[in-house]
Image: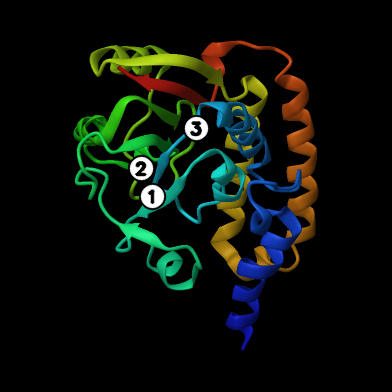
Amino acid sequence: MFHRFIDYISYKVIPFLTGEDKAPYIYISNMGYLNHKHLYNSFIKSLPYLKGICADIGSGNAIYKKILLPYVDEYIAVDKSDIHKHMFSTSKEKFVDADIKNLPFDDNSVDTLILTQVLEHIDEPFKALVEIKRVMKKDATLILSVPFIYQAHATPYDYFRFSEYGLRKICKDYSFEILEFHYQGYIGTTLVSILNGFIWEQASKNKPLRNTILLPFLLVVFTCNNLIGLFLDIFKNKNFSPNFWLIIKNR
């Protein structure tokens, strides 16, 4: 009974208090608020580039679907059931169960491809890029976001980090034209994201304590840290950005 109560707090109460269940519209009490805020803002700026058949690779719970549907003709959520068993069994979204290195799409068949916070989790990212290139139409749009300075996450499926200059070289090598390049926050977002992640990871070593006595304090700490991060991001040094967002055209 006690374990059910702790799980209820984990999967119902905490998402309610932090806005996780309303993603991408999360609250400032969420430990990942700053990263989510930047991702959401960049996604909104990307909407005019979206069109036609849209494949969301590594879609997770398809949190952006409701935003982009007015801009595309068809939305296809793609993810792997062997990694996200819980999501496949509980979500109302219909998924295409596929590996990014072997997509079940014809050559030159996709108008828009979304790849947000996914490429770092692919064990052979360059093979994945070849497959992405294969399925994209000429002049198709690729929305790509990847971390640069960020903690290990979704372990053990966390393999790579990408610098701005590495991304620009990849785009050149694969004949992709960068239409927009967004820095997803600066030193404030970087420091606070790592700090919040560290605090949560340490607290999670005792989940019952985290979900009861510590929870109110954690939410207050995350809120204060996020406010500090917003202030520190005034200092816009691109070399300390935690994440990059690219709007790319296939040539």
- Judged from the image, the secondary structure of the residue bearing numbered disc 1 is loop
Q: Residue 8: which quarter of the image?
A: bottom right
Instruction: Work out which quarter of the rendered image holds the C terminus and state it.
Output: top left
Q: Would you name the residue on which mark 1 appears? A: 155
Kind of residue at disc 3: Leu
Distance (Cα) linking label 1 and label 3: 31 Å
Kind of residue at disc 1: Thr
Within 10 Å of disc 3 (Cα), the crowding (few <14, some 14-19, many 20+) is: many
Q: Are marks 2 and 3 in contact (CB under 8 Å)?
A: no
> Horizontal placement of 238 versus 145: left or right?
right
Residue 196, how many percent across, how many down? Answer: 64, 42
Examine the rendered structure and indicate whether residue 119 appears above or below residue 26.
above
> Horizontal placement of 141 versus 104: left or right?
right
> Horizontal placement of 152 versus 127: left or right?
right
Mark sitting on residue 50: 3
Q: Are marks 1 and 2 in contact (CB under 8 Å)?
A: yes
Q: Residue at x 75, y 48 (%)?
A: 29
Q: Residue at x 45, y 49 (%)?
A: 75
- Judged from the image, the secondary structure of the residue bearing numbered disc 2 is loop
Q: Would you name the residue on which mark 2 appears? A: 158
- Judged from the image, the secondary structure of the residue bearing numbered disc 3 is loop
Viewer-nearest of labels 1 and 3? Answer: 3
Q: How is the image coloured?
A: rainbow
Residue 185, how many percent across, how many down? Answer: 62, 23
Kind of residue at disc 2: Asp
65 or 8, nearer to the observer: 65
Distance (Cα) linking label 2 and label 3: 28 Å
Q: Earlier in the sequence, mark 2 or mark 3?
A: 3
**What number of labels is visible?**
3
Within 10 Å of disc 2 (Cα), the crowding (few <14, some 14-19, many 20+) is: some
Q: Residue at x 51, y 26 (%)?
A: 49
Residue 68, how many percent across, how many down? Answer: 56, 42
